[in-house]
Structures are given as structure tokens and as C-alpha cells.
Image (spheres, helix red, strand yellow):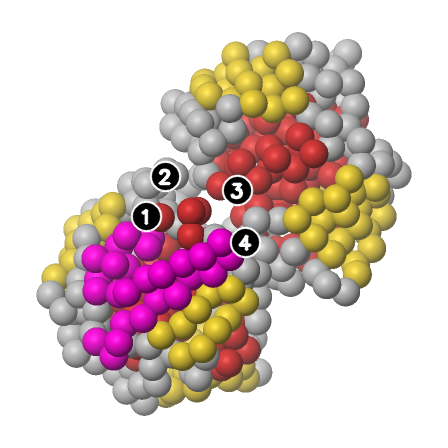
Amino acid sequence: MDKHLITGGVPLQGEVRISGAKNSVLPILAGCLLTDQSVIIKNVPHLNDVTTIMKLLGQMGAKLTISEGLTIEVEAGSVDNPSAPYELVRTMRASILVLGPLLAKHGRAMVSLPGGCAIGPRPVDFHVEGLRKMGADITVEGGYIHASVKGGLKGANLKFDIVSVTGTENLMMAAVLAKGTTVIENAAREPEVQDLANFLNALGANIQGHGTSQIIIEGVKSLSGGSYTVLPDRVETGTYLVAAAMTGGRITTKSTRANILESVLNKLEEAGAHISSGEDWITLDMQGRRPKAVDICTAPYPGFPTDMQAQFMAMNTVSEGRGVLTETVFENRFMHAHELRRMGANIQLNGNMAQIEGIPQLMAAPVMATDLRASASLVLAGLVAKGTTIVDRIYHIDRGYECIEEKLAQLGATIKRVAA
């Protein structure tokens, strides 16, 4: 099991290219199941989760071709095994996203209940109930979702009690080939949901309202092939910007977009960062100063993203003043706090709130990642700690960050990957 060794104390400087969005490419690859024709996906990040879903599609019978330049061609016309086994999906909750496309295209699916990060319950009830309203017969037994439909799915009015990103994506994909009109109320508005809708529309779907809380899908008989470029990863962008802020550095993130990161950029400016941006770049300059503590309350988009909460907790540990983080999206997403305390952080937990009193410097210690974003926060903490920090179980970070040690090293960080 690989580890990261990080020697802190170097302000980050330079430029870094941002990869395609993990949370866009996974549903987009699942969406390729909706058409028999060739689909070319560009700007695909090299991540463990992407490898997993590619293996899953291949096991179903799809043909995949990987080209240089981060491009994947998917031909799903040969899919003859509409199932997602536990062995492949146990590490990735996004695997549930094949359920809607398989049911819509093939009329049946058997999908293992998914695994993934241990950050609290993310039930599949929304997915199952929505598909039932569209005419599907679904049972859950033996750890698998067994779904079938006779005569095809039918449009329906669907309303979420709680905003669900994967629920919105799954039902939107299912509705693309359904008969009639589907309306999703209280839909997720995240840029990655919009990216999926734009991808499906590029193949001939009729989706309107994406980016708002009401999405309307007019079912079509079939989708065509095409080519699509995945959105930049806003969480990766934010992670490197926070790293620069924590270390008092100045970096430019390239191949990204500021308009999908407004809540994060606003909080970085509140922390004292100078930020400028263009069409495909963002520059953050801390001018060697220590950041100021900020208060955060996570919320569905356009609110502050839960996937940036851990990184801001790391920043607050070395900021001036006191900051309070409130996590409203997922339970059990403060496990990184206990590891940050091992490095000297002053963090008090009270339910879904964390109060952090900043200190001038953390101290290096061996720490262990518990989930994807928690692992990022520990790497960031290592960048500012005195001594050499060892971050264990970094397979979590490989699920969502492409070549993080190489990218940080090119910004001047002292970081290397070692085998356990």
C-alpha cells in the first residue's frame, strides 16, 4: 500500500494543469450505455474510479479504446451482460449510475449496492423509487438491485425530498429513452449534472432546465454517437488553490473555469487571497501572508461544496483566528479532524460542526486517510507542517486526483510516493 512522504514549509509557486472532472466523467461514461453508436470522450482524467467504470463497461460487453491525449472511445452496441457485480463496484458509489441507462436501453439490470467512501449514508432509495414511478419492477435482495421493465420506461413526474446528485443523474439518463415527458423537481444543479445533460443532448437527447431545480426530459427513440469534452474538475482546482493559500504561495491553475467555483473563490478571498481569472485560468496570490480563518457551511450547488470542506478545515488549522465549519450534506465527514489533531491542530467537534482555532504551524506526524477528500486535506496539512509527514492509505486520493504528487512537485512541494 503506497504512502506519501511530504516535507513541509515551501510556498507553492508556478502553474498546474487541471484534469477533467471525476464527477462528470463517471456519469458520462455510464451514459454511453444509452447508444449503440461510437462515442468519443475527451479530457478524461487518469483515475482509479475511471479505470473501475471502464472495467465495468468492458465486462458488460462494451468495447473501449484508449488514445493518447486523455481520450476514450466507447462502443456499447455489443453490451450483452447488463449487470454490475459487487467485485467491481464495491469501492465506488458512482457505480449505481449504470442502473438507469441499462434499464432504459436493455429493459433489465442487476446492479450491486455500491460502496465507496465511508462518509455516511447515501441511500439509493431516490433512484429506486424514481425508476418504479417510471414503470420499473425493482427488488433488492442479496446485496443487489434487480430491475426490469416491460415495454420500456414511461415519463413521470419525480420529486426529490432531498437534493441528490447521483439520483438526478440516474433518473435523467433513464428518462432520455423513456416514452413521454419526465419532470425532475428539486433536481441537483451541480455543474457536473449540467455537463451530463449537455453530453446527452449532444447525442440527440432532449433535456431542458439543467442547471435549475426543475429538469424536463422529452424521451427520444434513440441516441446517436458523437464526441464530447469533459468539464474541468472544480474540486481539484479548489484543492490546489487552497494549497497555495495555506503555504503563502502564488499559483495559476490552467484549463479550468472560475464560474463553476464561485463559492470557493469567495471564501479564499475572504481568507486574504488575491484572485484573478480568465476564460480558462485562475491565479491565486497570498503574497507570503498567513490566511485568515473562514466560516463554512456546506450546501448543494451553488452553495459551498461538501467536497471542499476537508481542504478548508486544513487551511483553517494554520489560519489566523477561529473558523467554524458546518457540514450539512453528509454525516460522518469529519474523520480527517482526528488525523489533523495528530499534527497539532486545535479542532473541537460538536455534531455536524467543527470549530478550528488556527495555530502558526502544524507538526509532521504519521496520518491515515479515511476517504478521498480527507486524504487531500492531510496532504495539504503536510505541505505546511514542520518535518516530514507520512500519509498512509493514499489509494483513496488516487480515486479522485490525477498525479497529485507530480503536480504538487512541479509547484515546488517536497513530496514523493513510496511503496509500503
Magenta residues? 263-289
Q: Does the magenta stretch include residue 68?
A: no
Which percent across, then down, holds residue 58? 80, 49
Which class describes the residues within 10 Å of circle 1: few (<14), some (14-19), or many (20+)? some
Residue drawn at (61%, 12%) of the image: 181
Earlier along the polypeptide chain: callout 4 or callout 3? 3
Q: Name the residue under label 4.
A: 232
Q: Name the residue under label 3.
A: 192
Q: What residue type is labelled 4?
A: Pro
- Give residue 263's mark: 1
Q: How far apart are marks 3 and 2 (CA)?
A: 12 Å
Earlier along the polypeptide chain: callout 4 or callout 2? 4
Residue drawn at (68%, 17%) of the image: 219
Pick the quarter of the image with the N terminus.
Answer: bottom right
Q: Distance between the residues labelled 4 and 1?
A: 16 Å
Q: How far apart are marks 4 and 3 (CA)?
A: 9 Å
Question: Quick one: SS at disc 2?
Answer: loop
Q: What residue type is labelled 2?
A: Pro
- Residue 122, compared with residue 256, is above or below; it is above
Answer yes or no: is residue 69 visible: yes
Q: What residue type is labelled 3?
A: Glu
Residue drawn at (80%, 50%) of the image: 73
Q: Name the residue under label 2.
A: 302
